[in-house]
Amino acid sequence: MLFEKAGEYILDKLRNELPVRLTYHNVDHTVDVHDAAKFIGQQENIDTEDMKLLLTAALYHDSGYLIKDKGHEEESCRIAKEALSLHHYNLNEIELICGMIIATKVPQAPKNLLEKILADADLDYLGRDDFFTKGYQLFTENSNSGTICSEDQWNQSQILFIKSHYYFTETAINLRETKKQANMNKIKALINPI
């Protein structure tokens, strides 16, 4: 498995080929998810081989945005299968990676620890201090595509999303859940100022 080469390959591709309208689902988001996955994976005590698979999945999880937005997870798997076979990943490793990628699809339904870690890493920002910065990037991206018309509509959709979201790993629950709820309350205050 040429782990470093596989990572360099997809990061270069994302940097050079993603549409500029993607103000959230860009290479910065990919690196952010990679770093969150690494941290959660360490806290969850996964072994070195699983960590390589997890971090590969993190780097490839949104590569489907190179092709299309809706259904990008399936495209991400297709891209991963193609690229990773060239980087000496075996079929079993690629299937595990694709399982993790699909686990990031909302609504999330991870089936094992690695899938839970990547699902949590993908939405780690919900329970962080940079929630509003990341959220504004996502708002801008959705505005660019015409799926959101106003900030009020965006705030309403964020509340519904956060209410339906669950973290899966003990690490994310302990580290992010309280702040996630606080972030949601701040959005509610924007909609219903006292």
Image (tube, rainbow, N blue to C red):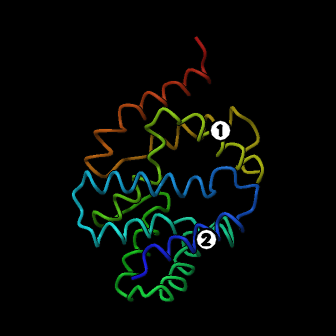
Which residue corresponds to mark 2? 64
Where in the figure is residue 134, as x and y percent of width and height?
59, 41
Where in the figure is residue 53, as x and y percent of width and height?
37, 72
Q: Secondary structure at mark 2?
A: helix
Instruction: Identify the residue at image location x=72%, y=44%.
Output: 140
Please tell me how crowded label 1 is: few (under 14), some (14-19), or many (20+) other residues with Cα within 10 Å. some
Which residue corresponds to mark 1? 136
- Counting every numbered tag in the picture gives 2
Q: Secondary structure at mark 1?
A: helix
Q: Quadrant of residue 99?
A: bottom left
Instruction: Identify the residue at image location x=33%, y=45%.
Output: 172
Q: Quadrant of residue 45?
A: bottom left
Instruction: Identify the amino acid type marked 2.
Output: Gly
Instruction: Identify the residue at image location x=32%, y=65%.
Output: 114
Q: Is residue 45 left or right of residue 25?
A: left
Q: Is residue 42 above or below residue 8?
A: above
Instruction: Identify the amino acid type marked 1.
Output: Tyr
Q: Is residue 102 above or below residue 160?
A: below
Where in the figure is residue 93, as x and y percent of width and height?
36, 81
Q: Choose the circle earlier in sequence order: 1 or 2.
A: 2
Residue furthest to the top = 194
Where in the figure is residue 40, as x and y percent of width and height?
32, 52
Q: Is residue 7 above or below residue 142?
A: below
Q: Is residue 172 left or right of residue 125?
A: left
Which quadrant: the N terminus?
Answer: bottom left
